[in-house]
Amino acid sequence: MAVTTTEYRLRVNPIACDAFGYCAELVPELVSVDEWGYPIIVAKAIPPRLFELARLAVRECPRQALFMEEVVRPSPSGKPRPARRR
Amino acid sequence: MAIEVPVIADHVGNLKTTRILAAWARTGRADLTGHVDTFGPMPMPRHADTASAGRLVEAVRSSGLVGRGGAGFPTARKLDTFRAGRRRPLVVVNAMEGEPASHKDRALLTSAPHIVLDGAEMAGMAVAAREIVLCVADDQDSSAQSIRTALAERAAAGIGRLPVKLVRPPGRYVSGEESALVAWIQGGPAHPQFRPVKGVPLTVGRQPVLVQSAETLAHLALIARYGPDWFRRAGLSDAPGTCLVTASGAVEYPGVYEVDIGTPVRLILERAGLTGPVGAVLVGGYGGTWLSPKLLDVPFAPRPLASVGGAMGAGVLAALPAASCGLAETARVALYMAEQSAGQCGPCLHGLHSIAYDLVEVARADGDRSALARLRFRVGTVEGRGACGHPDGVVRLVRSALEVFAADVAEHARHRPCPWWNDQPLLPTPSSLLPGGRRATNGRR
């Protein structure tokens, strides 16, 4: 029985990032930019419909500063784990 | 009036509890004889094996010792991480003293070098280390000299099993960040590294690196001697032991004090000779917070400080005289911190300078009135977006300044420029690039 969900989120390596801004152009739903052009990841998790676009943004980053990270969290809809039988 | 914090151990003898500074307080000497007379020999087992290492780690665990470098991580748990590994680690002693208002590392290194070296040896034994690397900033010659003397004494007396290397990374604010130190030891610039996953040990080549602050190791050396129950006799049950505090500002005897954790801030400042009413107290360091004068009775300990938004940090307590302007002080510190950025991350490189200049405009009241709104927006933008905690520290400090000095903000907003702006600063900003700034004192009196 699934009690955890696996989500994905975008992260930036701020040292590698040079504010090209491709990520914010490609997935503005997930990434905005600050006044200096550096990305701000606005979404906590990538919704499935944006997954491919997010992957494209990761692939297209000229500095390879964008990456995707797996977040495993307890499922909000999942039922509590049944007590293990001894 | 500019107030330098001298390296003071003169007043240490007046304190009730002295532990890591006890040899100095008792004998007034920093040498091996005074050290061994006071503490006894280093309790290194004749055959350092896994069992004796395990006993030491368990003693540290039940002592409740947490790191004194600022993060407050349980020392035993950190040691565990390194005991599990297959490769023999490197012990890095962080005595960089990056915080300009802190003088505890140089106080410790100049008045009690042997207790730090004992602690490094014992920690090295606990994790089966290969080598000890001691980091002293390149602008702190007196500390380095004291360590060299101590190492020569130990070599002559045949004390110590691990090779100790003294290295001198650049004396900049971010150099003391642990990943920056490791980067420098590897031969790179002393810049913080991006560490996407928490809790993964730093490495030099393939060697794991245990980084501990000098003060943490000094406490560890005493726990190894006297045990966890003794250690818990000072301090609080959830934060046992003593800690080093650097008191400066509106006090008669600025300097480094060893106090029980949980001593009220007011009491520490009074012990340092509080000279008059204070406008606020800077707690922790330049990435810390301002404490309102109404809250001076808060115990200097992690949990009580957290309840008022602060932390022990590097043990800085700088009392701002009631007549000075906290906004002007914060603006100067923010300028300094912006200049000390490694410049690797965009939000820190651009954001800190912008925040600092906004705050200068607010304090000097010579710009347009939009500076305050811009400042409030920008502190929210920059937070959490650097590879290290440097920008977050500035955000924390500026936010607390806007809160604690809200009356001054309102006053300046009515276009009353700050009369203190051109005056001599209270908090040191050791950089030749800043107005009123100056190089660090190198620990010379």
Image (cartoon, coloured by chain):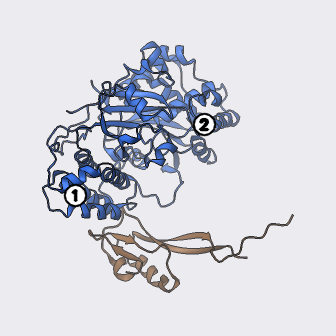
Tell me, yes or no, whether the two marked residues, 2 and 1, touch with CB atoms within 8 Å: no
Q: Which of marks 2 and 1 is nearer the N terminus?
A: 2
Badge 1: residue crowd in 10 Å (few <14, some 14–19, many ≥20): many
Is residue B430 left or right of B294 when viewed as pictured?
left
Q: What numbered label is drawn on residue B208?
A: none
**x, y percent for residue A15:** 36, 61
Do we see residue B137 in this rendering?
Answer: no
Chain bearing mark 1:
B
Q: Residue type at mark 2: give it.
A: Ser
In this rendering, the answer to whether A54 lies above or below B37 is below
Residue occupying the point 39% across, 25% down: B271
Q: Do labels 2 and 1 share a chain?
A: yes
Q: Quadrant of the N terminus of chain B?
A: top left
Is residue B369 left or right of B232 when viewed as pictured?
left
Chain B rendering hue: blue
Instruction: Residue under label 2, please give it.
Output: B237
Chain A rendering hue: brown
Q: Residue type at mark 1: give it.
A: Asp
Q: What numbered label is drawn on residue B358?
A: 1
Which type of secondary structure does the marked residue at label 1 adopt?
helix
